[in-house]
Image (tube, helix red, strand yellow):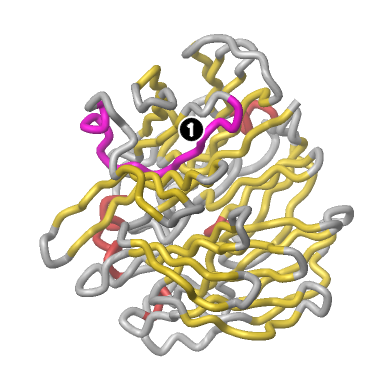
Amino acid sequence: MHNRFFLLVVCLSWLVFSLCSCRQEEQINSKEQEQHGVVQVNQVAGFYLLNEGNMGSNKATLDYYDYSTATYSRNIFAEANPSVPKELGDVGNDLRIYGSRLYAVINCSNKVEVMDAATCRRLGQIDIPNCRYMRFSGKYGYITSYAGPVEINPDYKQRGYVARFDTATLQIDATCLVGFQPDELEIVGDKMYVANSGGYMVPNYENTVSVIDLKTFTEVKRIEVAINLHHLRADRHGMLWVTSRGDYYGHPSRLYCVDTATDQLTDSVMIAVSNFHLDGDSLYIYSTEWSYIEMDNTITYGIVDVSTHEIKTRNFITDGTDQQIKIPYGIWVNPVTKDIYVTDAKNYVTPGTLYCFSPEGVMQWSVRTGDIPAHFAAVEK
């Protein structure tokens, strides 16, 4: 869950949404299946979708779409692991496949669930407080942690860190201090970049990207970018794309570019970003930009060409069906078919919707998901 409104209370601006979580507890349904789309046979067998579940509701769930049968299955973790108490847990924040294992970062349950990527059977658990995002390199996995409690405090004292764990033993063997409330991370060669948000410290946000030397696992520098940083993605041209949430008042959300050869900020693109997915040279973006000045969301579905740093479109949905989406929340592009997948969190406390669009931006099909569908992980054959 990225700084998602109420979910982690990462920003005071989204706290208003967390109040919507007061409701009667709902039972998590057992596995359900539906057929949508058409059968496809290529190197992408399917994809997992992690539903965050509203903070405090213990409703993180895992879904799967199988291209070979065009079948969408909901809540598969519960069926594969009937004896696991509380199922996945509270707020799914990231989802990754590395080797034969599937890793789900469960933020407010302070853990990473480790599963068999083929069966979703639980293999183990990594305990880490207020965990956020993860990446892998060689024998190690890396997880960002806010370290301290969920607390809006401009004088927050606890710096965050990156934890390193051995993928064979699932044991954390080292940590590296970074800035306050570190979010997404990216690995480029022997360097790791970490987006420091300072999201709990409104209005005293962080504005730097930490650079970690992976060989020594120490922070070697900070790159000043913009306030309230969130996502990172490295392209094939040696550039690191960094998103800023802004402050929801006079500092809007923006996209920034850092040269990884010099570790210098080189460019910015005037487009708001909540999340993105990089496919080739196309950076697919959605944004739900809240403004306390206008008291409204501005929604964008854009594509930025990372080779030219130009905005190709501000709405890749071309058939008008973007009007059906209330709150876009997750995005992924199939690397083979180029179909675009966008999720809708709706009101955050009821099941969301997954939409499949053609490369031309025409809606192909949609399906009901769990609460707050957010994070994709592609399964390759």
Viewer-proximal residue among 276 and 14: 276
Q: Where is residue 109? Give x, y as percent.
A: 57, 57
Query: Among all residues in the image, which is located at the extreme left?
Result: 294
Which residue type carries mark 1? Answer: Ile
Q: Where is residue 64? Give x, y as percent.
A: 58, 27
Quarter of the picture holding the C terminus: top right
Helix, strand or loop for disc 1: loop
Residue at 43% of width from left, 51% of height from top? 275
Q: Where is residue 177? Give x, y as percent.
A: 65, 82
Report how many numbered discs are placed on residues in the image. Answer: 1
Residue indicated by mark 1: 28
Query: Among all residues in the image, which is located at the extreme front?
Result: 308
Badge 1 crowding class, 10 Å Cα cut-off, few under 14, some 14 to 19, many 20 or more, is some
Q: 308 above or below 314?
A: below
Horizontally, residue 364 falls left or right of residue 337, namely: left
Residue at 60% of width from left, 40% of height from top? 87
**Residue 98, image quadrant:** top right
Horizontally, residue 181 falls left or right of residue 346, namely: right
Residue at 83% of width from left, 71% of height from top? 173
Residue 324 in the magenta stretch? The answer is: yes
Q: Where is residue 13? Give x, y as percent.
A: 27, 66
Residue 69 in the magenta stretch? The answer is: no
Horizontally, residue 366 falls left or right of residue 134, namely: left
Horizontally, residue 42 falls left or right of residue 271, namely: right
Q: Which residues are magenta?
A: 321-336
Residue at 45% of width from left, 77% of height from top? 225
**Residue 354, image quadrant:** top left
